[in-house]
Image (cartoon, grey):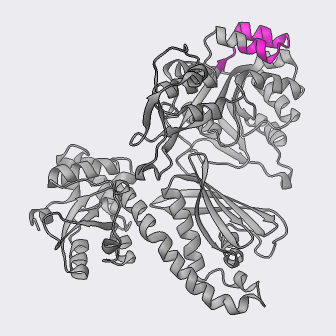
Amino acid sequence: MDNSRKKLRLGDVLVSSGIISEEQLQKGLELQKGSGRKLGETLVDEGFVTEENIVNALSSQLNLDVIDLQNVTISEEILALVPANILKKYKILPFEYSKESMNILRMAMADPMDMTAMDDITIITNLQVEPVVSTTGSIMLALDKYYGQAEVDSALEEYTKEKESQFAEQENMYSEDVNNSPIVQLVKNMIDQAVRQRSSDIHIEPMERQVRIRYRIDGALYEKASYNIRLLPAMVARIKIIGGMDISEKRKPQDGRITQIVDRHEYDIRVSILPTVYGEKVVMRLTSKNALTREKSQLGLGPADMKKFNHILQNPHGILLVTGPTGSGKSTTLYTALSELNRENVNIITVEDPVEANIDGINQVQVNPKADLTFANALRSILRQDPDIIMIGEIRDQETASIAVQASITGHLVVSTLHTNSAASTITRLVDMGIEPYLIADSTIGVIAQRLVRRLCPECRKAGKANAEELELLNRAPDEDITIYAPCGCPKCDGTGFRGRIGVYEIMEVTQPLKRIISKNGDVEAIKKKALEEGMHTLRMSAAEYVLSGITSVSEMIKVSFDL
């Protein structure tokens, strides 16, 4: 083992590499005291560095290899060498023997200077350890993959055996046993794994003989596990307890909230429970506290759309509407807009159901129908609070729409969402709600229709020539020679062919010519035609650009613009 490694400290490595300043190091060391966190974790949490920055600096300074564990298959022999609890404690993972010697074990480490971890592994395995640098995220994901399910399965097997004999007589015993460690572990692991796999939702679905667990990743559902149906009551009871719901009520739908910290980040989890034929179905919506507020540059807007977006936000009054189906990123766009507008000299008030993210400096109101605090009632009160900017979570009825329009005309900037298919159809939806066309024309400053498309995995996407049908969909000439990409699947994207999502936008700025068409109660086609003349890109056009640049596939483009 290179003894020079013992003399180096992570902070010194990062400073000498020019990644952080001495001041940032000192601040990180101060914050670390008494927190129980490692210095690297503290620096990442404060935004001074990324995990990748640390890995690259350590690799360069210590002359160590870098490994991405998602591209590696680890043998059963290696996995059996060290107990999972030790690996999780140190956040390390042995993955292969050295090519030079079977007595040397190559081990992925987020902190290759952790001599205690290396000494413990040497004692346990009787092998020499060769450190290889990896990110904490990559190591935790791999630990979940190889050990997570096995741990849970073993605990649950023991739990099921204990209870099997009693099950027939006493189903309610699970309710009393919800704090049993296997059940607690199961629910915790399920949430941890879902977060690490970038899931937006967890579905716990009772079937005739089993409980199916599915995660929604990048908008698509994937089955991840299944358990004996006998475990369902205990799982649901545990979720009800931590979600603040009524454990004894099994006949009515219930809603709750859970806050859980995963890998040092706080997640807000909305829980919905619905009674079904075979038992209660649970859906948990996972939201990171900081995921909804992004920089404008991260939204995926092209230069022309970004210019329109900025111009709309400069309006001192009027209505900006963001439209699209559930899960299309509307909340992210709204919160990003609010963060952009959030300054000391403006009073911003929101009314939401539910409040999805807390933003410093913004007054947020939670709708509460039981207390008669509806969108409409809340808006009336808000208007007496001297607001400059008002955000309405969703315009659901004529009353809310009418107040929003009046508020915008009286000098307020109003941002809100609607469920429509396109920017032009949003205008006609407001007319259908009973709002006069001249009022819509006078108040609306812009409409953003959006969807999310899955990004092709850059590691495994497959190139091919576009056929005649694909060329037609892309609005290209039949004889054009165009390369497009299709999903393939690899360990990096968990075999799906996709990794991550990007927004597709249709931004319609309501100009004077458009206002004239709207005030005369023009139909969808007339509004759309004029908007296109003024340079609007439709959802189909925006998605086609992503296909042509290799970001997404034709099938994804069709999904978001099938009827457009």
- Looking at the picture, tell me which residue is in the foreground, 24 or 289: 289
In the image, residue 515 lies in the stretch drawn in magenta: yes
Place of residue 349 in the rendered image (x, y in percent of width and height, measured from the top left): 68, 38
At a point 25% along the width and 44% down the height, the residue shown is 19
In the image, residue 488 lies in the stretch drawn in magenta: no
Q: Is the magenta stretch mostly helix, strand or loop?
A: helix
Residue 343 visible in rendering: no
Place of residue 222 in the rendered image (x, y in percent of width and height, measured from the top left): 59, 55
- Does residue 261 appear to the left or right of 40 in the view shown? right
Residue 319 occupies which quadrant of the picture?
top right
Residue 486 visible in rendering: yes
Q: Is residue 436 above or below residue 149?
A: above
- Looking at the picture, tell me which residue is in the foreground, 175 or 203: 203
Span highlighted in magenta in the image = 508-528
Place of residue 93 in the rendered image (x, y in percent of width and height, measured from the top left): 32, 67
- The N terminus - image quarter: bottom left
Residue situated furthest bottom in the rendering: 165
Q: In this view, does 548 lie above or below 5?
A: above
- Does residue 181 appear to the left or right of 439 in the view shown? left
Residue situated furthest left in the rendering: 3
Number of residue marks: 0
- Does residue 206 appear to the left or right of 43 in the view shown? right
Residue 377 occupies which quadrant of the picture?
top right
At a point 41% along the width and 42% down the height, the residue shown is 460
Residue situated furthest right in the rendering: 434
Residue 504 occupies which quadrant of the picture?
top right
Place of residue 418 in the rendered image (x, y in percent of width and height, measured from the top left): 75, 34
At a point 60% along the width and 27% down the height, the residue shown is 505
- The C terminus - image quarter: top right
- Looking at the picture, tell me which residue is in the foreground, 198 or 432: 198
At a point 84% along the width and 14% down the height, the residue shown is 438
